[in-house]
């Protein structure tokens, strides 16, 4: 028995049920908890003497976080009929609660999410605390699910169709004030007044008879006209499709449940919800997205070193060397997070460019209402600039972001040694140069580390923290903590060419070029990637990041992984003639008009003809296989070489760094889902193309033993 509900009585008599999973930080609705709630409901149904019931949490500022995600994630391993039965049990339980023989009020203090909101909606009324932690939401779609315990039917009957669509399809929670404005809660009061106000509300509902009238109202269809329905759902569907660009979307499924059920009596609407929910509950996509939720949580706690005693140094001031594309972005991130930052470059003009880039970041946020003029004031007061590195004398960390040239960088390190404090950390934003090798030029190699941000810095969440052979644990944890202060997600990896993300990305990019030269078309290649779920295809990505950047990075990778990299002359030729991609107006495609729309370019055909190796028909299946398998085989090697410590580092690195489709759960989880054995069969077909498709011995053994990168979670029932 879960032992999480305590029943007390106040004069009236009014029952007060306190929900508290003592051994956990938050209350969740797992199988055992629901069983206990069922027994409690059975007991309460017989209490005709009660005048009302209040439900509250025993954890101040923590109401109900929702269903138990461990159990939801494990549903994918249960037979379909068991999943269906679980859904029905939930509906029956919430139905009983909604029919208790007295008025019921939920007292919400702290986050009230998913199943917690559905439980509260099954009650007659809700009061929320005015605590800044209180939020009410149905975030199911963000993990590939839909509200499946009545949320899609009870919410519209409570707040109206439009607000319900907004809350359910965005998954965004609302503040208590908004909840009160839309009628989701009756009132907002200080947390310590919740029980008293709850009692008053119960008494009012009882004496006015409003609780019975309310129940009767909510059992009815919403009563929308056909035109109203058509308009509301067409708008919502259009918006969702615009955002998801054809990718699988639980929001569209939620919409189906709303559309099918709101104009029916409640019990029939609930039956529609069960039927629709069946499409997503226990699906692979939702298990993948739940997996990402857990990986994100684990990454948020990952310090990147094994020794728990190592403490980060405090970072009060920072410096950035170089005010170019990356330097200005990195300095902006520090200033926006309230860390004073000095930006140094070789000329005042470059610094002025850097400052204008910094201002642009905040200006564009002000334009969309995500920042205020006060944020601009903060940015400008926390950023200082100079052409002299003497500004770095009192910095705890300096991030070097100058031109990608080893000689220039190592000379800069020697110069910085005369300025920086001995205990300060020097981090480099290099994308390709060895950290271990460059550390030799730093005065203190143990305080030298890679801190690899991605472009554009203000929008990309990932930061690779790369330890060289001599980098100390203290340096690593300090940079990890600094990255978190910048609201980034740091992933610690060991030094190798390409580090984590680019090492795995480059084989995919190169494979796209090889496919093109063998006869696949650009559109076919890009379509295969977007169909899999990537935000754009590898050819389009080349044009976006710049062909020169890809060419240079490709050279470094080809030198480091010569046994499995096939070099082609195509990128070199394009770069030589100034076709650098979008930034120069043409690359693989040409970019036309004010918007720079990518368009087929007949001039490109000449380059293609010159470099073509074959002209055969290539199937879509082969394109997808080769793009993904080239990546996967490299990812496996990265893991085996201990470049990262766990599969989640590979998967989250690719999701955050290159937009690997989250609904696939990550590259290694995709491999788990397909099955390593099946992957081996697919790779076998391309064995003659080279070593890049050759699985490692460890991977073969894994496939034979049936092991997975992620062990199957324990089933909750
Ligand atoms: P950039 O050319 O835009 O900027 C480089 C800046 O460094 C220029 O303003 C230049 O004047 C300045 N500089 C050069 N030598 C200097 C010195 N000795 N002292 C002070 N300033 C000096 O380059 P970028 O794109 O910002 O790249 C910077 C670094 O970040 C490189 O190591 C690059 O590999 C890495 N990086 C770039 C990207 C990207 O997408 N652009 C992504 C990740 C990492």
Image (spheres, helix red, strand yellow):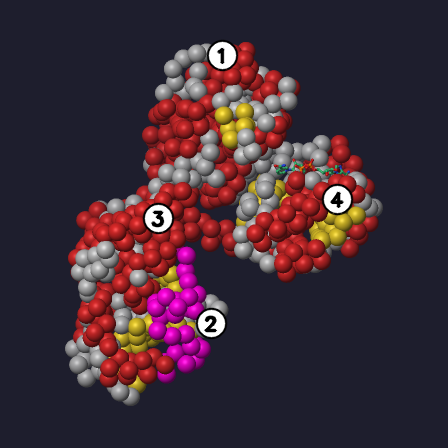
* Label 2 vs 3, first from the N-terminus: 2
Mark 4 vs mark 1: give the one in front: 4
Query: Which stretch appears magenta?
Result: 171-196
Q: Are marks 4 and 1 in contact (CB under 8 Å)?
A: no
Label 4 within 8 A of ligand 1 by Cβ? no
Q: Earlier in the sequence, mark 3 or mark 1?
A: 3
Q: Which residue position is annotated with label 1?
A: 613
Q: Which residue is mark 4?
A: 351
> Which of the two marks, 3 or 4, is nearer to us in this view?
3
Within 10 Å of disc 1 (Cα), the crowding (few <14, some 14-19, many 20+) is some
Which residue appears at 78% of the width and 36% of the height? 411
The image quarter in which residue 580 lies: top right
Q: Which mark is residue 235?
A: 3
Label 4 or label 1, whichever comes before in sequence order:
4
Q: In the current view of this chain or complex, which residue is farthest to the bottom?
A: 11
Q: Position of residue 505 (x, y in %)?
A: 52, 32
- Residue 705, image quadrant: top left
Q: Is residue 532 toward the left or the right of residue 343 in the image? A: left
Q: Nearer the viewer, mark 2 or mark 4?
A: 4
Does the stretch in magenta take in 193? yes
Task: Say which of 46 and 444 sits in front.
Answer: 46
| Magenta stretch holds residue 94 | no
Closer to us: 449 or 696: 449
Along the horizontal axis of the image, is 630 left or right of 458? left
């Amino acid at each position: 028995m879960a032992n999480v509900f305590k029943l007390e009585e106040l004069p009236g008599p009014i029952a007060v049920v306190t929900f508290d999973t003592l051994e956990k930080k938050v209350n969740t609705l797992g199988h055992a908890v629901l069983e206990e709630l069922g027994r409690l409901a059975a007991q309460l149904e017989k209490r005709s003497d009660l005048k009302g019931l209040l439900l509250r949490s025993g954890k101040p500022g923590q109401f109900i976080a929702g269903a138990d995600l461990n159990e939801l994630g494990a549903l994918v391993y249960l037979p379909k009929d068991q999943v269906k039965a679980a859904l029905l049990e939930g509906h029956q339980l919430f139905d009983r609660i909604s029919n208790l023989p007295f008025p019921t009020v939920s007292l919400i203090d702290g986050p009230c999410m998913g199943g917690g909101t559905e439980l509260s909606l099954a009650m007659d009324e809700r009061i929320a605390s005015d605590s800044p932690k209180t939020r009410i939401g149905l975030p199911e779609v963000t993990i590939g699910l839909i509200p499946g315990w009545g949320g899609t039917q009870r919410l519209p009957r409570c707040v109206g169709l439009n607000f319900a669509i907004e809350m359910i399809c965005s998954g965004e929670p609302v503040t208590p004030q908004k909840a009160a404005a839309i009628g989701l809660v009756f009132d907002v009061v200080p947390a310590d007044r919740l029980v008293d106000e709850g009692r008053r509300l119960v008494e009012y509902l009882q004496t006015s008879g409003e609780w019975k009238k309310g129940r009767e109202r909510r059992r009815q269809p919403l009563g929308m006209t056909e035109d109203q329905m058509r308009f509301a759902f067409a708008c919502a569907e259009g918006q969702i499709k615009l955002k998801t660009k054809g990718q699988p979307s639980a929001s569209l499924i939620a919409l189906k449940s709303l559309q099918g059920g709101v104009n029916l009596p409640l019990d029939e609407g609930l039956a529609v919800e069960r039927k629709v929910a069946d499409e997503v509950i226990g699906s692979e996509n939702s298990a993948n997205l739940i997996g990402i939720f857990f990986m994100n949580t684990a990454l948020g706690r990952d310090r990147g070193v094994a020794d728990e005693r190592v403490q980060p140094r405090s970072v009060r001031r920072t410096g950035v060397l170089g005010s170019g594309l990356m330097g200005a972005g990195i300095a902006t991130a520090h200033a926006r997070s309230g860390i004073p930052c000095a930006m140094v470059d070789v000329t005042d003009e470059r610094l002025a460019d850097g400052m204008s880039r910094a201002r642009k970041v905040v200006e564009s946020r002000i334009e969309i209402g995500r920042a205020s003029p006060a944020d601009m004031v903060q940015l400008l007061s926390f950023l200082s600039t100079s052409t002299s590195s003497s500004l770095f004398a009192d910095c705890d960390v300096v991030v070097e972001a100058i031109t990608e040239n080893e000689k220039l960088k190592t000379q800069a390190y020697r110069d910085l040694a005369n300025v920086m404090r001995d205990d300060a950390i020097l981090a480099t934003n290099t994308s390709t140069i060895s950290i271990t090798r460059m550390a030799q030029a730093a005065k203190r190699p143990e305080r030298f580390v890679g801190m690899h941000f991605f472009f554009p810095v203000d929008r990309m969440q990932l930061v690779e923290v790369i330890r060289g052979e001599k980098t100390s644990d203290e340096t690593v944890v300090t940079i990890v903590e600094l990255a978190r202060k910048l609201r980034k997600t740091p992933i610690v990896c060991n030094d190798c060419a390409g580090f984590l993300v680019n090492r795995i990305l480059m084989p995919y990019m190169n494979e796209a070029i090889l496919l093109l030269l063998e006869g696949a078309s650009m559109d076919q290649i890009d379509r295969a990637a977007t169909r899999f779920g990537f935000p754009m295809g590898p050819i389009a990505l080349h044009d976006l990041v710049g062909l020169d950047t890809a060419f240079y990075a490709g050279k470094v990778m080809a030198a480091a992984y010569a046994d499995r990299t096939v070099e082609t002359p195509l990128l070199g030729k394009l770069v030589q003639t100034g076709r650098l991609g979008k930034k120069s107006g043409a690359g693989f495609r040409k970019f036309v008009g004010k918007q720079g729309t990518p368009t087929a370019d007949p001039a490109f055909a000449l380059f293609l003809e010159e470099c073509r190796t074959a002209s055969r028909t290539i199937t879509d299946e082969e394109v997808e296989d080769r793009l993904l398998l080239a990546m996967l085989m490299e990812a496996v090697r990265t893991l085996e070489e201990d470049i990262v410590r766990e599969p989640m580092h590979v998967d989250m690195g690719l999701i955050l760094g290159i937009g690997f489709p989250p609904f696939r759960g990550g590259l290694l989880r995709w491999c788990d889902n397909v099955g390593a054995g099946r992957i081996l069969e697919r790779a076998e077909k391309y064995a003659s193309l080279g070593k890049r498709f050759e699985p490692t011995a460890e991977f073969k053994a894994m496939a034979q033993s049936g092991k997975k990168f992620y062990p199957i979670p324990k089933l909750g029932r």
